[in-house]
Image: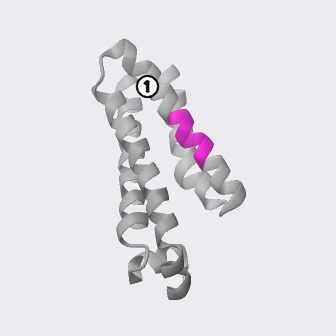
C-alpha cells in the first residue's frame, strides 16, 4: 500500500508542477488562455496573480517531493501535512472558482491521503 501511496503522491506533485508552469509561464499564452478559458485582456491583467498562485503550487509540489525523500517516520507527517494542504486548496478552489478543481486537485490528494493511512 505504501508504494501505491507514494506513486499517487508523485502524481499529485507532478500535477502541481504542471499547474506552476501553466500559471507562471503559460497564463498569457494561447495554451494557457485556452486551458483556463481566458480572454487576452483578462489574462494580461491577472498574470501577476496567476504567477503568485503558480508559485504556491510549486511549494506544494516541493513539499510532496520532500515527503517522498525524507526518512520514513518524518515522511509520514510530511505526507499528511502537504496532502491536507492540497485538499484544502482544492476544496476552496472548487467552492470559489470551478468545481472541476475538486476532482483535478483535491480528489487525487484525498485518495493518496487515504492510502498513506492504510
Query: Residue at (62%, 52%) from the top-left corner?
Result: 102
Tell whether 94 sits left or right of 13: right
Q: Residues within 10 Å of mark 1 (few under 14, many from 20)?
A: some
Pick out the residue farthest to the right.
95
Pick out the residue farthest to the top.
73
Please, what is the dominant secondary structure of the magenta stretch?
A: helix
Image x and y of residue 30, in percent: 40, 83
Q: What stretch of residues is rendered in magenta?
A: 83-89
Tell me if residue 72 comes above or below residue 45 in the rendering.
Answer: above
- The answer to if 85 sits in the magenta stretch is yes
Image x and y of residue 91, in percent: 65, 47
Quarter occupied by residue 66:
top left
Tell whether 85 sits left or right of 21: right
Task: Please state the total of marks drawn on the protein image.
Answer: 1
Query: Residue at (48%, 74%) from the top-left corner?
Result: 35
Q: Can residue 118 be seen from the camera position used here?
A: no
What's the image's color scheme?
one colour
Tell me if residue 85 comes above or below residue 16 in the rendering.
Answer: above
Q: Can residue 69 be seen from the camera position used here?
A: yes
- The answer to if 94 sits in the magenta stretch is no
Q: Secondary structure at mark 1?
A: helix
Image x and y of residue 19, in percent: 42, 59
Front in this rendered view, residue 113 or 94: 94
Image x and y of residue 5, in percent: 41, 30
Query: Residue at (30%, 16%) from the top-left corner?
Result: 71
Query: Residue at (50%, 35%) from the top-left corner?
Result: 83
Residue under pointer 1: 78
Front in this rendered view, residue 14 or 81: 81
- In which quadrant is the N terminus drawn? top left
Amino acid at each position: 500500500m505504501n508504494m501505491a501511496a507514494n506513486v499517487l503522491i508523485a502524481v499529485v506533485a507532478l500535477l502541481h508542477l504542471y499547474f506552476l508552469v501553466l500559471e507562471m509561464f503559460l497564463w498569457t499564452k494561447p495554451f494557457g488562455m485556452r486551458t483556463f478559458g481566458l480572454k487576452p485582456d483578462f489574462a494580461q491583467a491577472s498574470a501577476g496573480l496567476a504567477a503568485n498562485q503558480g508559485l504556491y503550487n510549486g511549494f506544494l509540489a516541493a513539499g510532496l517531493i520532500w515527503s517522498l525523500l525524507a526518512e520514513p517516520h518524518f515522511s509520514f507527517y510530511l505526507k499528511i501535512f502537504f496532502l491536507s494542504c492540497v485538499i484544502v486548496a482544492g476544496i476552496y478552489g472548487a467552492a470559489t472558482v470551478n468545481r472541476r478543481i475538486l476532482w483535478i486537485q483535491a480528489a487525487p490528494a484525498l485518495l493518496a491521503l487515504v492510502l498513506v493511512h492504510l
